[in-house]
Image (spheres, rainbow, N blue to C red):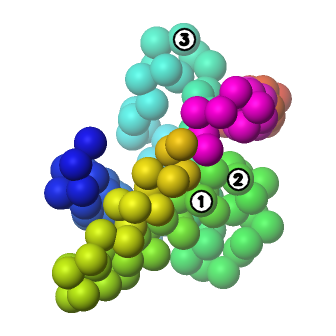
Amino acid sequence: MTSNKLYVLITTACIVGYVWLFFHISANYTDFSNVKVCLVKEVTGIPCPSCGTTRGVISLTKGHFLEAIQTNPFSILVAMIMIFAPIWIGFDIITKKRTLFYNYQKVEKQLIKPKIAIILIVLVLLNWIWNIAKGL
């Protein structure tokens, strides 16, 4: 993947995420139980590992850190990406560097190592089991 493609992908994902959050927050936390987003849950009736991430990020915006973790720990990671990625991309644009891209490549090289990949897969599976047990 080129640096430009990565930056466009991350920027687009952040914009979509901000719009999605705005939609939920501006509706005064209306009950969105009738909004069906997760295809995995719709097809199988079982929540996916990321189910509850939106609710977790909304909890963070309200200052409820523990509630966010209990809803879905991925919400912490998603919120951090949504906050820091645009700042980092802006820095790279202003300085005409590609520090985000170079660090992405370094992290990617680490993630494909079997030991690290297995640990991360186990963490995702544990989160998935927890989501199922919580009845998300």
Q: The residue under label 2 is which amino acid type?
A: Pro
What residue is drawn where x is 60% and y is 78%?
62
Q: Compute the Cα span from label 2 to label 1.
A: 7 Å
Q: Are marks 3 and 1 in contact (CB under 8 Å)?
A: no
- Of labels 3 and 1, earlier in sequence is 3
Is residue 51 inside the magenta stretch? no
The location of residue 103, given as percent across then percent down, is 47, 62
* Magenta stretch, residue numbers: 110-125
Give the quadrant of residue 75. bottom right
On residue 44, the disc is 3
x, y (%) of residue 58?
A: 54, 66
Q: CA distance from mark 3 to mark 2?
A: 22 Å
Label for residue 101? none
Question: Is residue 55 at least partly visible in the picture?
Answer: no
In the image, residue 114 sits, relative to residue 58, either above or below, namely above
Q: Which residue, given by chain and number where applicable, does mark 1 sit on?
A: 77
Tell which tag, 3 or 2, sits nearer the viewer: 2
User: Which amino acid type corresponds to the residue marked 3 in the rendered image?
Assistant: Thr
Look at the image and say whether residue 119 sits in the magenta stretch: yes
| Residue that mark 2 sits on | 73
Q: Position of residue 102 (x, y in %)?
A: 40, 61
